[in-house]
Amino acid sequence: MREILGRRRRMRLGRKGGTARLDAALTCATAWQWPVLPGVGLQPADSRGERGRGCACPDPDCAVPGAHPFDPGLLAATTDARMVRWWWTNRPAAPVLLATGGRAPCALSLPAVAGARALAELDRMGTRLGPVVATPTRWLLLVAPYTLERLGELLHAQDWVPSSLRFHGEGGYLVLPPSEIGTGQVRWERAPDSARPAPGGGMPVQPVASPWLPDVGAVLDALVEASNSAPDGGSRLAY
């Protein structure tokens, strides 16, 4: 009886999680006009209802388990509500992926520990940030769309940038809350427009249209300054 009750509880939680991901995908696509698509997700649950931590794609050595496009591919990302509903109705456990660039947000990311240090330092400096996505391994600071040409100019103007810094621009993607991936749960560290986040790190309870996004140049300058301001002459953002 205890096993049956446990299975029913996991099923209820699974349905709840699926609804949360569908709601998140619809908010992105329709309210914010951010193109989304489902990630490949994790291995199916076993006979005990426990989901595997490995990627559902054919690659046994997948470097980003669950957190990448597979079928459909990245070019299928859309803001069409009917397509979004169809995807997550059929695949309720699929992670929510954002196709970055174009008119959609881009991002800068750091390893999780360095990301937490960066946010604390940028807050101390008075830098205004937009939404921040936290995964167990990396934190992503969302910024306004930028082109590869502009990014190249910005990087050329810097004497040095932290080696742990990554850029997610045109033609890329990132995973959004409340997705579950191979490394664990994805959540909002800073919810869009500072709206109160939903339970479990999902979309804000009261999402707003067109969340404010900072310029990539302002965030990059602040990160470089924060990294160079360590008292011992090292980098606060070292990996």
Image (cartoon, grey):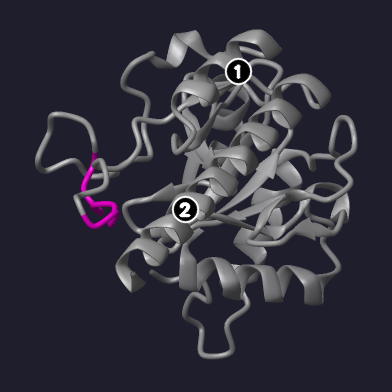
> Which residue ends up furthest to the left in the rendered image?
60
**Callout in the foreground (1, 2):** 1
The residue nearer to you, when weighing 13 against 126, is 13
Question: Dot 1: within a 10 Å radius of its alpha carbon, few (fewer than 14), some, or many (20 or more) residues?
Answer: many
Q: Which residue is mark 2?
A: 165
Q: With respect to residue 64, does 101 lie above or below?
A: above
Which circle's residue, 1 or 2, is located before the other in the chain?
A: 1
The residue nearer to you, when weighing 142 against 205, is 205
Q: Which mark, by number, is residue 84?
A: 1
The image quadrant where one finds the C terminus is bottom left
The residue nearer to you, when weighing 66 against 172, is 66
Where is residue 2, by image quadrant? bottom left
**Could you tell me how many numbered marks the image carries?**
2
Q: CA distance from mark 1 to mark 2?
A: 31 Å
Relative horizontal placement of residue 7, taking residue 223 as reference (left or right): left
Q: Is residue 140 magenta?
A: no
Q: Residue at x 64, y 30 (%)?
A: 25
Residue 222 image offset from top left, x and y in percent: 70, 59
Q: Tag 1: residue type?
A: Val
The residue nearer to you, when weighing 57 against 225, is 57
